[in-house]
């Protein structure tokens, strides 16, 4: 997996960039923000596109448990989006991003380039924010 540091202005999605900027403002004031302090406003993001995860860690094993899945996530992965519902081909990429977010306590922005069944290029964006 290719990893590079980029400025927040390089985030392509306007709503994801707004979420990242809101997180950065909180981080500048409070250090690692608490989720309860995160209130970006209704026009900043679309909750239908969001996943909220919690981390369960026992005996050195980290597991991610979804707390909220927006309706668009339901369309993409079905009911009860979990890491088990992520296609095996993406599981390593998804988990490595989440692990990096936890380890760094920092924003992780990922782009994943693939193609659809017709061979057309598709680029997926993923923003991870730690709390």
Image (cartoon, helix red, strand yellow):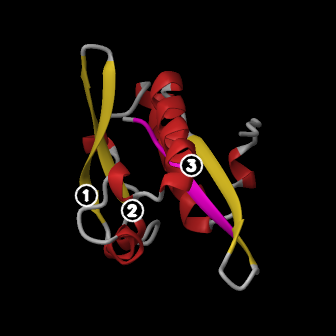
Q: Position of residue 101 (x, y in %)?
A: 50, 33
Q: Are marks 1 and 2 in contact (CB under 8 Å)?
A: yes
Q: Residue at x 47, y 38 (%)?
A: 98
Name the quadrant of the N terminus. Answer: top right
Q: Residues within 10 Å of mark 2 (few under 14, many from 20)?
A: some
Q: Closer to the camera, 60 or 5?
A: 60
Q: CA distance from mark 3 to mark 2?
A: 17 Å
Q: Which residue is mark 3?
A: 21
Secondary structure of residue under mark 3: helix
Q: CA distance from mark 3 to mark 1?
A: 22 Å
Q: Which residue is mark 1?
A: 68
Secondary structure of residue under mark 2: loop
Residue 24 visible in this rendered orientation of the protein: no
Q: Residues within 10 Å of mark 3 (few under 14, many from 20)?
A: some
Say the numbered circle drawn on residue 19: none
Q: Which residue is mark 2?
A: 50
The boundaries of the magenta stretch are 123-130
Q: Closer to the camera, 76 or 91?
A: 91
**Earlier-in-chain disc, 3 versus 1:** 3
Q: Residue at x 56, y 48 (%)?
A: 21
Q: Closer to the camera, 45 or 48?
A: 48
Q: Residues within 10 Å of mark 1 (few under 14, many from 20)?
A: some
**Earlier-in-chain disc, 1 versus 2:** 2
> Is residue 21 toward the left or the right of residue 122 in the image?
left
**Earlier-in-chain disc, 3 versus 2:** 3
> Is residue 63 toward the left or the right of residue 123 in the image?
left
Residue 75 visible in this rendered orientation of the protein: yes
């Amino acid at each position: 997996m290719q990893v590079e540091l980029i400025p927040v202005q390089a985030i392509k999605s306007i709503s994801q960039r707004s979420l990242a900027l809101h997180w950065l403002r909180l981080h500048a004031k409070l250090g690692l923000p608490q989720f309860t302090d995160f209130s970006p406003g209704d026009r900043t993001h679309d909750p239908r596109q969001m996943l909220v995860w919690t981390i369960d860690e026992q005996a050195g094993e980290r597991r991610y448990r979804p707390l909220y899945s927006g309706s668009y996530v339901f369309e993409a992965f079905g009911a009860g989006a979990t890491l088990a519902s992520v296609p095996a081909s993406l599981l390593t990429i998804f988990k490595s991003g989440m692990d990096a977010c936890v380890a760094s306590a920092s924003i992780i922005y990922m782009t994943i380039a693939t193609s659809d069944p017709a061979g057309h290029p598709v680029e997926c964006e993923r923003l991870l924010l730690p709390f």
